[in-house]
Structures are given as structure tokens and as C-alpha cells.
Image (cartoon, rainbow, N blue to C red):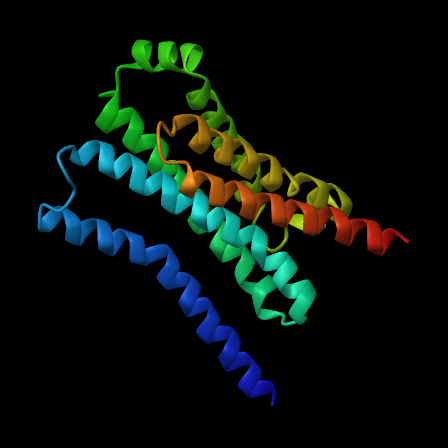
Amino acid sequence: MASGKNQNVLLFRLVVLGCGLGPAIILLVKWLFGDMGANPPEYVVHFTGLTGLTLLLATIAFSPAFRLSRWVGFMIARRQMGLWAFFWLVMHMLSWMGLDQYWDWPWIYQEMLELEYVRYGAGALLLLIPLALTSFSRAPAVLGWSAWHWLHRLVYVSAALGVTHFWILTRADYLLPGTFALVFAGLASFRILDGMIHRQ
């Protein structure tokens, strides 16, 4: 029985690995076949951002999934998914700086000052840095469980900033950013209600 559970966890971790590596394969194939539209740099920037935000919300969703199913695989793979989300959001920022802004640091600084959505996106990524740095298994023991737990609640703030970034950036069709906003609202509401129930 235990062996079967371990196999299920391993398979799930492989699925998460596929979620992290799969977008890179898709991006490579699209580049090789010239299937990135009229503006490939813009496509890469948007693709990496959408991938990172999707994986970030998936990371948050692992906690309610565990609460509802009590399957430990969600919690075991949560760090792995979170690090993939961080990786893709870093790629999003780097591709924006390099492919869109051509590493023009004065211009990048000016864009951050003038464009609200850039500030939201940068803030979302900055909040994830301490989470990534404290994602190793000994971190809770080093920081103390309470401090580590409160620190990692920043993922909700980061996701909120990321969704806001996506919403402001959108010009016409709000279906996708609206879907992201609804998913985040549902996850945040679950977290609040679950916290209230367990404090009683």
C-alpha cells in the first residue's frame, strides 16, 4: 500500500516536472517553425508571463487541494511547482528587459516609473524572491515555523499583483485576465475561510 502511494506521488511530481518543462519545449518548437506571429519578442514576453502566472496560481491551488483530498502528494510537489512558477516569471522579466527593452537600463527605469503595470509585475516578482530563497526543506527549522509560514503567505500578495499586472496590460479581450482574477479570488477566499474555521 505504501509503495503504491509513493508511486502516485512520484508520478505526480513527474506531471509537475512536465508542467515546468513543457512550456519551454512548446516555445522552442514555435521558434523553430516560425510560429510566433508577427512580433516574436512580444510573443515570448507574453508566453513566459502567462506560463509563470498560471503555475503560480497552480502552486496556491495545491493547498486547498490538499485540504479537500488529504492527499500528501499536493504538499510534496508544491515547492517544486512554486520554483517553476518563479523560474518562468524570472524569464518573463528577463525577456521583457532584453527582447523588449534591449537592456537599456535608463529606459527600463523610466518605464518602471511611468507604467503602472510594470511596477505591479516587478513587485510580484520581488515578493517571490524571499519565498524561493527559503524554499529548501530546512528553512522552516531555521526561520521558525511561524515566521516561515507568514513569509510564504506573500505568495497571495504576489499573485494578486501578477493578476493586476495582467489586467492592466490587457487592452481589449478581458476573458483570460478575468478568468485569472476569478481563480485567484476563489483561492484567496478559500484560504481566508479555511483559516477562520481552523481558528475556531
125 or 193: nearer the eye?
193
140 or 125: nearer the eye?
125
Q: Position of residue 89 (x, y in %)?
A: 40, 39
Q: Position of residue 13 (x, y in %)?
A: 46, 67
- The residue drawn where x is 55% and y is 48% is 183
Q: Could you tell me if residue 72 is visible in this image?
A: yes
Which residue reaches farthest right? 200
- The residue drawn where x is 24% and y is 24% is 100
180 or 160: nearer the eye?
180
Check the image and report above or below for 128 versus 113.
below
Q: Position of residue 54 (x, y in %)?
A: 44, 48
Q: Which quadrant would residue 177 be assigned to in this image?
A: top left
Left or right position of 135 against 86? right
Which residue reaches farthest bottom? 1
Q: Tell me the quarter of the image containing the N terminus.
A: bottom right
Check the image and report above or below for 137 versus 109.
below
Q: Which quadrant would residue 185 be assigned to in this image?
A: top right
Left or right position of 62 against 14? right
Q: Position of residue 170 (x, y in %)?
A: 38, 30
The mark total stands at 0
Which residue reaches farthest left? 33
Left or right position of 41 against 150? left
Left or right position of 14 against 40? right
Q: Which quadrant would residue 92 be assigned to in this image?
A: top left
- The residue drawn where x is 91% and y is 54% is 200
- The residue drawn where x is 63% and y is 57% is 63
Q: Could you tell me if residue 87 is visible in this image?
A: no
